[in-house]
Image (cartoon, rainbow, N blue to C red):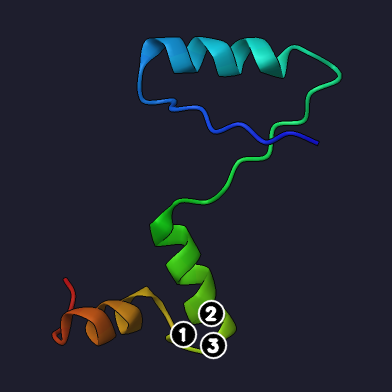
Amino acid sequence: MTYIAIDEHNAEGKKLVAFLKTQSYIEILEEPNATTRKAIKNVEAGKVRKAKNPEDIFHQVLGRQYQ
């Protein structure tokens, strides 16, 4: 198996990935970005917030009443 990293932040990279997705013998494995990886680790570690409703979570995050 071979792994290749393709920069999709430019037109050529996007075109290449689009082409590769059309090939039945190629499997595209997309990794989550750094922010998502950090969020996954936080959830796995139990670092989550619980709220009764949307207003409650805004109050927890912002420290004031949301209106």
Mark 1 residue element: loop
Give amino acid for label 1: Val
Q: Position of residue 32 (x, y in %)?
A: 52, 51
Residue 11 falls in image quadrant: top left
What residue is shown at x 56% (from left), y 12% (from top)?
Answer: 16
Q: Which residue is mark 1?
A: 48
Residue 43: mark in rendering: 2
Q: Dividing the image into 4 quarters, which one contains the C terminus? A: bottom left
Mark 2, Cα crowd under 10 Å, few <14 / some 14-19 / many 20+, is: few
Mark 2 residue element: helix
Total tally of numbered discs in the picture = 3
Q: Position of residue 27 (x, y in %)?
A: 77, 30
Q: Position of residue 23 (x, y in %)?
A: 78, 13
Q: Which residue is mark 3?
A: 45
Image side of residue 16 versus residue 63, left or right: right
Label 1 near label 2: C-beta < 8 Å?
yes
Give amino acid for label 2: Val
Which residue is situated farthest in the right direction here?
Answer: 25
Give amino acid for label 3: Ala
Vertically, is 31 above or below 26? below
- How far apart are labels 2 and 3 at the CA level? 5 Å
Q: Nearer the viewer, residue 39 or 61?
A: 39
- How far apart are labels 2 and 1 at the CA level? 6 Å
Q: Position of residue 48 (x, y in %)?
A: 46, 85
Vertically, is 27 above or below 25? below
Q: Say which label, 2 or 1, has the lower sequence index.
A: 2
Mark 3 residue element: loop
Mark 1, Cα crowd under 10 Å, few <14 / some 14-19 / many 20+, is: few
